[in-house]
Amino acid sequence: MFFNRLTFSPIITRPIMYYGICLAFSSWFAFFIAIMLNLPNPYWAAMPAWVIFQPTRGLLLERAVYRFLGTFIGAAIGFSILLIPLHPIIQLVIFTLLIGVTTASSHVFRGTIAYGFFTTGLTMAIVIIPSIIWPSDTMDLAISRVACTFIGCIVVTIILALFVPKFPIRSFYQKIHLLTSDVVFYANQVVTARSKEECHDIEQTLLASINDINDNAAIAAAGSIHKNRKLRYIDAIIAASLDVMAASRAILTRNLRENVLPAEFSDDLLELSKQISRKQPFSLEDTYFFTKWQLESPELTSEIKRLIYTIEQLIAAEDALVNNIEKHKDFIANNYTSTLLLPHRDWRMAINIALITSFIVFTVSLCCYFNPSRIAEQVASGIGIFAIVFGSFPLPQNNARNLFIGVSSGVIVAIIYRFFVQPYVDDTFWLLLTIIPFLLFGGICRAHPKTAIPAIDANMAFLFAGHIGMGASDAFSVLSADFIYVLSAGIISGMFILLPRKPDKQALNAILSIQRDLDRIIAAQDAVNKNWYEQSTRQLLRLMLHLSRAGKVGDSAPNGLLSTLNVGYSITMLHAKLEQPKLDHTSYIQIKTILYILSLKPKGNLTIINEINKQIQHIENDQLRRIAEMLVDSLNESQPFFNYIRELKKKMA
């Protein structure tokens, strides 16, 4: 069996070898140019290849641009701080404050923009720390390192862009199209279900699919201004999908009170799902569904009209994505595409990790400043750089093991090169020739899915610890520098393992944000003037992201997520009723009473539900009664969600 697996599942496939060779050649060629230009520390030119490399061309180009910009801005800031006639300790204070800003920004902003902030902080550290602690000739070395980095960025980007494929945008749009069909099919299954448990599995699958599309949207748009403009349409599809699912759940709960489904409606929903799956792109004109079931029809209940409207928005959003137009007037009026879904800004986590990173960098740099030596400079640089690297990771404790293994492996290979190869290298030709096998091996490891992450640090460590292209050093200097490099990685890895960022805690913060949004709506903040779904859908996506990191999406994610949307929708409808000029005084008092009850206790409290039920018994306005009943039903449906809050709080206590 083992030999069969080796036979039919080769360890190194053709694509792995292909990309490995491309990476090795781009790194080698950048190193070659730096050697030809007689730049000090030419190995810095070979480093960008390992971090810029990405599986798609657009992402690679964006990453290269932000690497270039980050290096330029970081170098400019670093040299400016050094040239200002201030005491070195004050320079360190300014530097660490800026490190905090760049580290926090790398978490506040997502994607390749975050990488730009990270590169800015890293470049500042490379320029400032050695120059303050061991100022002898380090300014020239810092300039040469920055110059080599620029050379590496340009060369590597040009070479890799010729071989890395574009993102498979057609298959991505196909996945979005299938989501549209599946969401309509979900609506059919839910409105005809007899209980909420019947559709749990398909709901979890759809939520995971929506989360996956949301995660890959920025990757699909990377490197293209035109595709970036289309992100608002993908956001519109995500918002509309969640809206359709929530509207379907509202019909299910309403059906338990009275049957609101018209004859043939569920059959037409199923047929619409089939029509969408058969035709891509699909537009509103490709079906009779919206001709037969019109929003103006007085025979349809408000729940059915809401579902029809949200399905309309979903189809119009996909049509706009494919054709770059918004054909449907209501699609524009609904504000689905007027603004991108608000990105999540986790300020608390960003500030915490910025404080930790700044404290480590400042403390180590200050200690080494009062004990200046070449070894002190290496310790401060190593720990400072690794602290900044770890500070940029979303979950550093998950990366600690891979980083330490990569650094240790790279240092071991560097020692082998320094002691068993470099002593026999007499000229530039043999230098360039002898590093090819090492770069080729590193390229294959970087291209292999199982070793890609540790291989980044291994290749960087090989070039940095090996001082490839530099003059020979005595054994003690080589081993002490390599030991300090590994020790720095070990210290920072250990520190961040002891200070983990738990997905459960982040999930709790996401849930509490949804609770705060509900409280703001109850208090009439963002209830009428703004589209609440624009905010709530991003919160749900944020929650699903953290749950997926915790291994819960598609498995044991809390029920009631969609019902929280219906809670918010019901509260928004109550505020909308308050805005009606002809609202009678009794209804006004009843709405105010319901909102007051909601503001008293947590939304998952059964006392609130009982109190609102008592109020419903006295409501004579049919529309208001219907909204209040939807609110009670949604609160009941949301019970598992609010119970999950209590469970997480106990777990995190």
Image: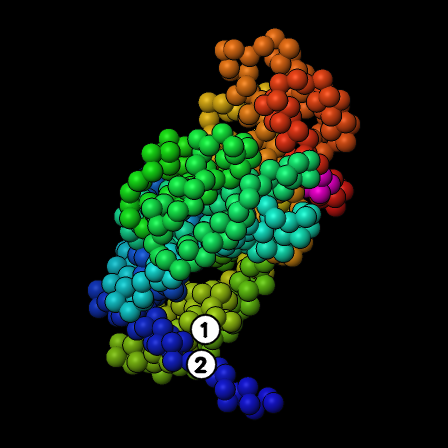
Q: Is residue 353 visible?
A: no
Displayed quadrant of residue 474: bottom left
Q: Position of residue 521 (x, y in %)?
A: 57, 25
Q: Read off the residue under disc 2.
A: 12
Please tell me whether residue 151 is drawn above or below residue 73 in the rendered image: below
Q: Position of residue 134 (x, y in %)?
A: 43, 51
Query: What is the distance, in whole Å, between disc 2 and disc 1 at their CAs?
Result: 8 Å
Please tell me whether residue 402 is drawn above or below residue 526 in the rendered image: below
Please tell me whether residue 425 is drawn above or below residue 105 in the rendered image: below
What are the residue bounds of the magenta stretch? 638-643
**Pointer 2 local density, CA inside 10 Å: few below 14, some 14–19, many at least 20:** few
Q: How many labels, in total?
A: 2
Give the amino acid type for the residue marked by disc 2 in the picture: Ile
Q: Name the residue located 51 percent from the left edge and 39 percent from the top edge.
A: 307
Dot 2: what SS? loop
Residue 642: say if magenta: yes
Q: Name the residue located 73 percent from the left edge and 21 percent from the top edge.
A: 617
Please tell me whether residue 563 is drawn above or below residue 7 in the rendered image: above
Dot 1: what SS? loop
Give the amino acid type for the residue marked by disc 1 in the picture: His
| Front-lying residue, 393 or 543 | 543
77 displayed left or right of 89: left
Q: Position of residue 237 (x, y in %)?
A: 43, 45
**Pointer 1 local density, CA inside 10 Å: few below 14, some 14–19, many at least 20:** many
**Chief secondary structure of the magenta span?**
helix
Q: Classify the position of the N terminus by image quarter.
A: bottom right
Q: Position of residue 127 (x, y in %)?
A: 38, 49
Q: Are marks 2 and 1 in contact (CB under 8 Å)?
A: yes
| Front-lying residue, 14 or 474 | 14
Q: Read off the residue under disc 1.
A: 448
